[in-house]
Amino acid sequence: MDYKVKLDIFEGPMDLLLHLIRKNEMDIYDIPIAVITDQYLEYLDLMKELNINVAGNFLVMASTLIHIKSKMLLPAPPVDEEEEDPRLELTGPLLEYIQLKEAAIQLNQRPLLYRDVFTRDFIPKEMEGKEEGLIRVGLFELIDAIRKILLERKQDELIFEGSPLVPIEDKMEEILARLKQKGRLLLTDLFPSHINKQEIIVAFLALLELARLQKIVIYQEIQEGTLLIYDFLPPSTVS
Amino acid sequence: MNELKSLIEALIFVSPTPLSLKKIIEVAGESYPHKEIETALARLQAEYDTPERGIYLQEVAEGFQFRTKPRYSEWIKKLKKIGPSRLGRAALETLAIIAYKQPITKGEMEHLRGVEVDGIVRSLLEKNLIRILGRKEVPGRPILYGTTQRFLELFELKDLSSLPSLEEIRSLSDELSDGESE
């Protein structure tokens, strides 16, 4: 399968690190570097396996992690040589990043023009156009969900041949048709227990592509964590 | 005073963008003393600040503008057929970085976010939320970006100094650092 997803994913290595730190409830001032490096690399492998183009900056971060990890393994320097914790190289930028993310959240909580408050003018063209963050749950949550599905199926025979592959375009059509019929789908609806690994990947790529084309939005239920897929209703133009 | 108050109301009503005090004085200053204009403006603002009104008078982007109260947003969207908000998370984060760190180059933004920002910067420029401030005098002379008046209008900010400081945000994010508050 040489279909490569070239997603304009704005989530980068920093988001992945934060995701892992939060998921494992790690202390950001005392990151277990070996654990996080392993998990990070595992993610990169999975992303490659799912044919997501892994941007160069993910690899740069991977080498930073490995570098820090190896530094931590070196014997401690003599006491008179005060050496700083190599993890600071990670903690500093992460803290700054968290702070700026929080600033963005606070900006978004202000009374926003054309969302919360309105003036007498019409909605200007500048507010139309492509939206960037359409995968509401974020790529990593989606990967997590797929990973869980893949792990659950690990025991079964994950055959790579067998039934002829459905092209991604057909899968996309199928998902849209089912959405039209039902209004919304559970993520797990798309991965019935009998499908094989290859089909899982095709369905996953179809989902990513549909999200990129703004045909669907994916939400996560807060309480149960279920991923839901909805039709994307494009905003009508202002008359 | 009542006459002056109504006059100011009319002036703000016809202005497509926030009307500055300076502009009001330019128009009405020959007939009324400046001090009186300021008092009338403050009173007008207070009068709108009651539950009976559907709009309020807000100081934004160094001017005054009538805005509909947030509790009516759903009805207005229905009337105007407006879809969901068009600023994604990545755009918001980049915008926050520019707002707090301006003047800032693309390289510096990328360093902070760990991802490239070309597409986002272009779309923020198109939306007139950021602008080019000049060039940084370092090798390569990269372009420096900053926010616009339009940015202030969009986020209902009087000026850039009315953003909460990064120190205030830091203490908040420390409390929140073990839970995503999105």
Image: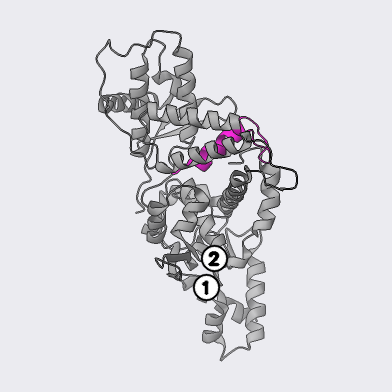
Q: Residues within 10 Å of mark 1 (few under 14, many from 20)?
A: many
Residue A196 image point, x, y percent: 36, 14
Residue B48 image point, x, y percent: 63, 65
Q: Are marks 2 and 1 in contact (CB under 8 Å)?
A: yes
Residue that appears at 63% across and 72% down: B44
Question: Magenta span covers which residues?
Answer: A10-33
Q: Quadrant of the N terminus of chain A?
A: top left
Q: Quadrant of the rendered structure where residue B37 is?
A: bottom right
Q: Residue furthest right?
A: A79
Q: Is residue A17 magenta?
A: yes
| Subunit ID for the residue under disc 1 | B
Q: Which residue is mark 1?
A: B12
Q: Is residue A80 magenta?
A: no
Q: Which residue is mark 2?
A: B66
Residue that appears at 43% across and 28% down: A45
Residue A179 image point, x, y percent: 36, 26
Q: Secondary structure at mark 1?
A: helix
Residue type at tag 2 = Phe
Residue type at tag 1 = Ile
Q: Quadrant of the C terminus of chain A?
A: bottom left
Residue B82 image point, x, y percent: 42, 49
Q: Secondary structure at mark 2?
A: strand
Pick whichever, A162 or A68, lies toward us. Answer: A68
Q: Is B32 above or below relative to B85?
A: below
Q: Is A183 above or below relative to A68?
A: above
Q: Residues within 10 Å of mark 2 (few under 14, many from 20)?
A: many
Q: Is B7 above or below relative to A131?
A: below
Separation of marks 2 and 1 at Cα, in angstroms:
7 Å
Residue that appears at 60% across and 60% down: B53
